[in-house]
Image: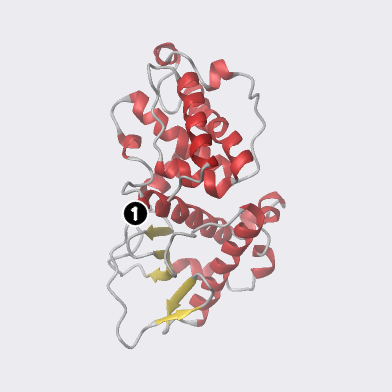
Amino acid sequence: MRILPSLLLATMLVAVQVGPCRADDEPRIISDRFTISASASVSERRFSTLVAARAEAIDYALGAILEGAGAYIHIEFARASDASYLLTYPAAYDPVRHALTFRRALLDSLNYNVTPWAKAYWPYYRTEGLRELIPAIEVIDNALWMAHLQEAAHRKGISWPHPECSSLDAAKRLGCEMLVAGAEASLHPPPMFNSNRLDMLWPESLRELRGRSWRRSDTAYRDVQRLGGLLLLRSLVAEFGLPRALQYIAQTPFHIEGDNVRVSALHYQEQARLALTVSAIN
């Protein structure tokens, strides 16, 4: 996945307004974490079972997610004619209602049983061609991770991505984008890059970077954004696990102080270690 579409996806995954269930349409429990409408079709139940299977695969491979999401997360499907239809992206999460909404059109891509490929997290990303063959699994994974991030942020009374991602201040925007990009890059097998080049990935002078490359499409900017963001999270993930590291960044914006990314990143990591060591995550 490329960073810009992913960042837009993160920005899009906000509350979706859907009316409450009718009295005769009480939710049906499909796992210890998810419910669907009692009137759900066979294909909707099959897709929801796949969502539950991917959540279990993530729990087993990387650690428990969505633990603070309430008793259940309700899975919904939106048709093109619905007011809640997702015009741009295939999934959205509402942390207020604990509701995960998918485009109903996704059901058409799963006209055969793909559960065997969904039960383990990493093989899906490491098996050549599997992501192209079953793209719906990646859509589900993205939605689950985004729900995890948004739930953590919501418990702190803030949103994910943080508002700074749309700031006109370049330093504020870059710090936010680094967290979003680092989170995205941490979800898949890591790219190969020279992590020793801190002068490039964590520049000590944003003024110098502005002089060389400041447009989001420029390679130098994207390297700081994505690889610098991955480097910011990597040691925290190694020490505390991906779910807890993502909870922390969702609840704690990254601020670049004094135009110095390197000093700011090291301070952010130090504060994160202190907080995570004492389990200071609500």
* Percent of width and height locating residue 100: 42, 64
Secondary structure beneath label 1: loop
Extreme-front residue of the structure: 278
Q: Foreground residue, 263 or 178?
A: 263
- Binning the other alpha carbons within 10 Å of mark 1 as few (below 14), some (14 to 19) or many (20 upward) gives many
Q: Foreground residue, 226 or 97?
A: 97
* Percent of width and height locating residue 137: 58, 60
State the scheme by which the image is colored: secondary structure
Point 44% across, 56% down: residue: 147
Point 61% across, 45% down: residue: 188
* Percent of width and height locating residue 261: 46, 21
Relative vertical location of residue 174 with respect to residue 32 in this rendering, above or below: above
Relative vertical location of residue 105 with respect to residue 204 in this rendering, above or below: below
* Percent of width and height locating residue 34: 48, 71
Q: Foreground residue, 219 or 229?
A: 229
Q: Would you name the residue on which mark 1 appears?
A: 14
Left or right of residue 176, residue 223 in this image: right
Q: Foreground residue, 279 or 131?
A: 279
Type of residue at label 1?
A: Val
Point 56% across, 55% down: residue: 138
Relative vertical location of residue 264 with respect to residue 275 in this rendering, above or below: above
